Amino acid sequence: MTQSDSLSSPTAVQDEPQKSPASSGRLPGDLDMWIMVLGDILIFSGYFVIFMIYRAMNPEEFLRAQQHLDVNIGVLNTVILLTSSWFIARAVISARAGRHVQSIRLVYGAGICGVLFMVFKSYEWASKISAGHTNADTFYSFYYVITGVHLLHVLIGLIVLGVVIRELRNPARRRTSMVESGAVYWHMVDLLWVIIFGLLYVMR
């Protein structure tokens, strides 16, 4: 086989590494997902601004109520979601490299972290309600609304990850952009929690 034949053979073409989104100038994922993510961030930003306004108006009341939050659970949930972000980021890298089985396992890892987050958050909610911290308190009314809407986004994120796994399992439907879109949404969920953790648990 001549050098020109080897260069033009299908095998040689298949062995060429795929260009990364950064090198090709393409935004990772689908544009529709980015629009939805930016819209969600704007909505949460509104919640955060209103929370800060009410906190500035009633700093002592908010501080007293904040003392009853379990910072340890907040830290644990933060670590869990940051770990899930690592899983989904590695899943994207594996999918781009054509290692689909590995990518599926990594997406499962991100999903398990999401389920763990929901379990610990549900436990925290139950403990606060049983202790009498209801939405009759201004701080806890924000707490339940903000964390509740975020919890809904975690649930939606788990559904998105399920769709990603379904596509990765089907050779005829495998799209790297779908994995990237799932990762974009999941990273948004994690980012929002980091901000929520800072506002509700850490800021004094």
Image (cartoon, rainbow, N blue to C red):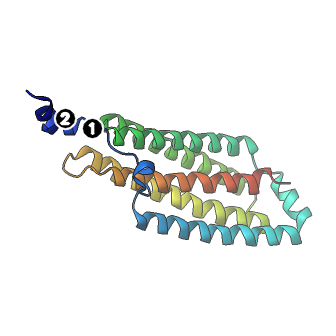
Would you name the residue on which mark 1 appears?
A: 16
Would you name the residue on which mark 2 appears?
A: 12
Residue 138 image-quadrant placement: bottom right
Is residue 141 shown above or below 67?
Answer: below
Name the amino acid type tagged 2.
Ala
Q: In the orientation shown, which residue stands out farthest toward the right?
A: 60
Residue 21 in view in this figure:
yes
In the rendered structure, the answer to whether residue 104 lies left or right of residue 39 reads: left
Label 1: which secondary element = loop
**Which residue corresponds to the image point at 10% horizontal and 34% vertical from the top-left?**
5
Residue 189 image-quadrant placement: bottom right
- Expressed as whole percent of the image width and height from the top left, the position of residue 167 reads 28, 50
In the rendered structure, the answer to whether residue 54 lies left or right of residue 166 reads: right
Q: Relative to the observer, which residue lies in front, 184 or 80?
A: 184
Name the amino acid type tagged 1.
Glu
**Which residue corresponds to the image point at 41% horizontal and 37% vertical from the top-left?**
106
- Expressed as whole percent of the image width and height from the top left, the position of residue 154 reads 52, 55
In the rendered structure, the answer to whether residue 16 lies left or right of residue 203 reads: left
**Which residue corresponds to the image point at 71% horizontal and 54% vertical from the top-left?**
128
Residue 135 in view in this figure:
no
**Which residue corresponds to the image point at 20% horizontal and 39% vertical from the top-left?**
13
